[in-house]
Amino acid sequence: MTPILTDLVAYQALSAEQKIITHLAYPAVLDVPRDFVDEPVVTLAEYAPEGIFLFWEEIRNTLLRASVADRLIEAATNLQTHWLFFKIYETYRTPTQQRREFAEVREEIRAAHPELDEAQLYDRTSQFSADPDTLPPHCTGAAIDLTIADKNGIELDMGTPLNSIDAASSHAAKLPSPACENRALLLSLMLDAGFAPHAMEWWHYSYGDIRWASYQNASVLYDIVEG
């Protein structure tokens, strides 16, 4: 089970290893300082070297902050030494898309857990989708949802599907081989490139947003990009 904290100071006192498996809940995650920088948004599919990424066929766009794209290219280059590729599922979301996403996840959880009251439903939903009225990572161009695939686009076993709200999607989950090793490879590559993980979602990584800032004991770098 994933530990959940509601206090930023207590979370930031954890070791890096403990932070990976500990979820910092709303509204505590919003308490991190903000020092926004003016940085361009780039189109990853055009910005990156040709052939370095695979993209989900239904991806809406590949927009990211330039520094985020640079770090992702670094991680992808290191992954290719294993003859594997990152498969990108989602990058930037407009605020409207984030609001729709939050509502869809809330209804999925409501259907699965009718016993939850509205406050509990909000808490559970915000573990898997950022509150659209805060500073959602995807809306800042700071976050990526991705997995690892071979050259034919066949995805490695990660234990759960990407975007699953199952408890086994968390970094705290105990998984059999090869899913355990595959997740560890993804985590290692992304951490080495300076990204922060999301404790509840093995596929979600970010740089410069509120979750990265809380993980790094730093300031938020990016404001919302209006779509």
Image: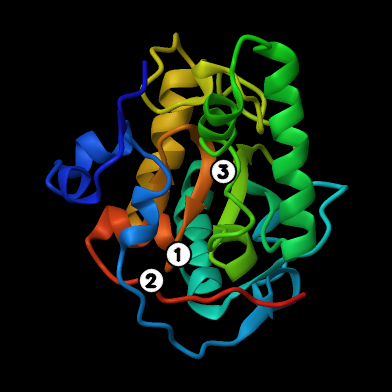
In-image side of 125 versus 71 (left or right): right
Can you identify the residue that label 3 sits on? Answer: 83
| Element under disc 3 | loop
**Disc nearest the viewer among 1 and 3:** 1
**Disc nearest the viewer among 2 and 3:** 2
Which residue is drawn at the image coordinates 79% and 48% (left, top)? 100
| Element under disc 2 | loop
Crowd class of label 2 (few under 14; some 14 to 19; many from 20; radius 10 Å):
many
Residue 166 % position (x, y): 58, 18
Query: Is residue 217 among what the camera can see?
Result: yes
Instruction: Establish if 218 lies above or below 162.
Output: below
Picture quadrant where residue 35 is located: bottom left
Residue 213 % position (x, y): 33, 62
Query: Is residue 152 among what the camera can see?
Result: no
In-image side of 153 versus 8 (left or right): right
| Mark with earlier residue (2, 3) | 3
Specify the amino acid type for callout 3: Trp
Residue 66 % position (x, y): 55, 79
Specify the amino acid type for callout 2: Val
- Contact between marks 1 and 2 (CB within 8 A): the answer is yes
Task: Work out how far the residue at label 2 is from the one at label 3, CA to CA, in angstroms.
Answer: 34 Å
Which residue is drawn at the image coordinates 45% and 64% (left, top)? 209
Q: Quadrant of the C terminus?
A: bottom right
Pick the residue in front: 125 or 153.
125
Can you identify the residue that label 2 sits on? Answer: 220
Pick the residue in front: 170 or 75.
170
| Mark with earlier residue (1, 3) | 3
Which residue is drawn at the image coordinates 66% and 80% (left, top)? 42
Pick the residue in front: 136 or 182.
136
Task: Work out how far the residue at label 1 is from the one at label 3, CA to CA, in angstroms.
Answer: 30 Å
Which of the labelled discs sits on residue 209, or is there none?
Answer: 1
| Mark with earlier residue (1, 2) | 1
